Image (tube, helix red, strand yellow):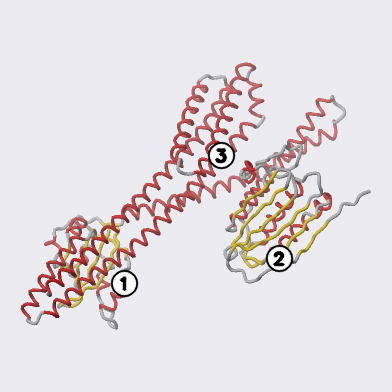
Amino acid sequence: MWNRKAQLGFGAAILTLLGSGVISYRALVISNQSQGWVRHTDQVLEGLQEVLSASQNIESSSRGFALTGDKSYIESFEGNTLREARAEQSIKELTADNPVQQRRIPVLDNLLAQKIRFCENVSDLRRAKGMEAAAALVGHGLGQQIMGEIQDLVLEMQDEEQRLFGARNAEATRQLEHTKIVLALGSLVGLLIALVAEWSVRHENVKRGRAEETLRGMEGRYRGLLEAAPDAMVVVNQGGEIVLLNVQAEKQFGYRADELVGQKVKNIIPQGFAERLIADGTRSAAEALAQQIGTGIELSGRRKDGSEFPIEIMLSPLENAEGILVTAAIRNISMRKNADLHLVQKVEELNRSNEELQQFTYVASHDLQEPLRMVASYTQLLASRYKGKLDADADEFIDFAVDGCNRMQRLIQDLLAYSRSGTDGKAMQKRSSEDALNNALKNLIGTIAESGAVVTHDALPVITTDDTQLEQVFQNLVGNAIKYRGTEVPTVHISAARNGLDEWIFSVRDNGLGIEEQYFERIFILFQRLHGRTEFKGTGIGLAICKKIVEGLGGRIWVESQVGKGSTFYFALPGKDLTNDIDSNELRTHRSLVSRG
């Protein structure tokens, strides 16, 4: 009868440990998948950098040929064109499973095609009409504009890859943590089953000799359990001596079993493990170990050749006639540590790249201001002194120069505003979004009066945010609603609704021109305009600033619209800590009328 119980107990323990082995294998698969995503992200980032580098070389070759007429630049142009095509094809294949990136591929393909056509036009013009004609086309700025759009799009695609990589790595980490917990519980259950089986056998035997024979049989079967474990298993007594280990431990540390049995565990785990076996004088060793059962402890292991490697150990106490033994499941976590280090390096590189890009944008824009002010001043001086005294063409040329300087100044100022948005905000505090809207409307009072616009809003909530940045979002959205108006008097309505307990969704609805659905995403990109400069003033940066601010506050922004029927811009902000309710029936109206003579 006792033998039958022992067989059942150890059979259950073996099955439990085998299950733990399957879980360990799954954890290894997850770790390998995480490594694969690291390589995949690196390949995509390298491909994007290759596209950007090839595009820059194509532009350099084109300019070189335009200036010198040297045919070697044509060969460089053609080589870089092939290089760019190969890199773009590689990106298409690598991001085939990413619909967000796939939507950007045609845009990138179109921009690259525009770039190549422009450079070919420069080369053709150089051959046909000479360097001055080609230089004039280059100086027009179209090539630089296309190159800037390519750089912005490549940066967005790089950001998407880093975001996707972070999400995948977080999911892999979560699954690994879950696997560690299940593995620890499985090991503990297996050992507990073995202990229960031993207890049952010992208590069902009356004679001491039979009990000792049963105990020896238990030792042999316990060794079988150790050998069935997928990890290195080491059993240590309270004196810190190794009393039992499995084949995996021999392989992992490079020793034979007879070289380790009876030796101090410090020989293979120099620090941290032996100290956990010693009671502190106020607790028993069992009590001290009880706090660490199932907890993954990261230490360093030392092989026979002296090399060290990172390990994770899980401790389980095992009581026998000699006292408490400690069973340690030891796993080599070198691959996981390398993956973590690689991810940290990539994150640091990305942060450093973003900081350098932001600093470059600010410094370049700021330094461009001074020479541009000089050009603008002297051009305006020419206009004031000589307009009407020269021929009509000269007057037109002066007007073009003045207009170009003014537009360049607006572009630089908007670029500075974009680079600063979201970077110098105040500490997040509970603020009235209604106060932020009212301040924005005060800033727009001239625009509202000039257009005769009617701006209304529902009662708005108190949320934890940066009210200065929220004010800027309201100002840009309401200002755009008034600017892009139709033939009717512009009407704008602002409201907010709680989406569960997680966020507030604000809406800015107008009766303006409306937007085609194909442009819903494009309008939030830097310097993207749907109308010509002669129709509406501005550089197309306002919505990009709104997107940057809202996302910096932890939210999101989008638009719904129909051409000719107006648009509704939505943005969502976190709202978990809200304590006040608003009366949605309360309506306050701000109205500005234009005096008519």
Residue 323 occupies quadrant: bottom left
Q: What amino acid is found at the position of numbered circle 3 in the picture? A: Gln
Q: Is residue 304 left or right of residue 511?
A: left
Q: What amino acid is found at the position of numbered circle 2 in the picture? A: Ser
**What is the residue that sits farthest to the left in this orientation?**
209
- The residue shown at (22%, 71%) is 193
Q: Nearer the viewer, residue 422 or 365?
A: 422
Q: Which residue is mark 1?
A: 292
How packed mark 3 is, by other alpha carbons closer than 10 Å (few <14, some 14-19, many 20 or more), is: many
Q: Nearer the viewer, residue 397 or 537?
A: 537
Q: Is residue 591 left or right of residue 498?
A: right
Q: Which residue is mark 2?
A: 584
Cα distance in 3D space between marks 2 and 3: 45 Å
Marked residue nearer the N-terminal end (3 or 1): 3
Whether residue 39 is situated above or below residue 323 in the rendered picture: above
Residue 151 bears which disc, if any? 3
